[in-house]
Amino acid sequence: MLVERLIWSHKISDYDGVAGAISRVSPAVDNDQLIIGDILNSKETHNGVNVIAIDRRTEHFCGLLRLRLTQPRSSLDLQLSSTA
């Protein structure tokens, strides 16, 4: 019998610093990294997106990629930050 249990849980704002932020749809998994994108809330988005990498086993923050639109529906301004 398979028994499921919660391994860890954090607010998205613990990783991106955006109060009230939530995860966009389904996460991606690459080896031990859980990769998610965020939005401000269910009705409002960023001017772009934050892509967050988290170690899925330890829950530690691996990195944050901020994608920002410099003009509506045009080029992206990329910023990469990490505390790892």
Image: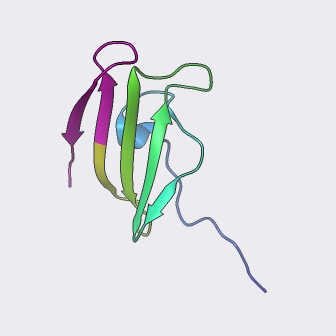
Task: Please tell me how many numbered marks the rendered image carries.
Answer: 0
Tell me residue 52's x, y (percent).
38, 46
Compare residues 72 and 67 and report the one nearer the observer.
72
Tell me residue 61's x, y (percent).
33, 53
**Residue 77 on the magenta span:** yes
Residue 45 is left or right of residue 15, and the answer is right
* Quadrant holding the N terminus: bottom right
Residue 63 is left or right of residue 72, and the answer is left
Q: Which residue lies furthest to the right in this view?
A: 1
Tell me residue 24's x, y (percent).
55, 39
Compare residues 79 and 2 and report the one nearer the observer.
79
Image-quadrant location for residue 44: top right
Which residue is at a point 51% across and 28% down the rendered structure image?
A: 20
Is residue 9 placed above or below 41 in the rendered structure? Answer: below
Which residue is at a point 21% across and 34% down the rendered structure image?
A: 79
Residue 47 is left or right of residue 84, and the answer is right
Is residue 74 placed above or below 49 in the rendered structure? Answer: above
Residue 73 is left or right of residue 1, and the answer is left
Is residue 83 placed above or below 31 in the rendered structure? Answer: above
**Residue 83 on the magenta span:** yes
Q: Residue furthest front?
A: 74
Which residue is at a point 32% across and 32% down the rendered structure image?
A: 67
Q: Residue furthest bottom?
A: 1
Q: What stretch is highlighted in magenta?
A: 65-84
* Quadrant holding the C terminus: bottom left
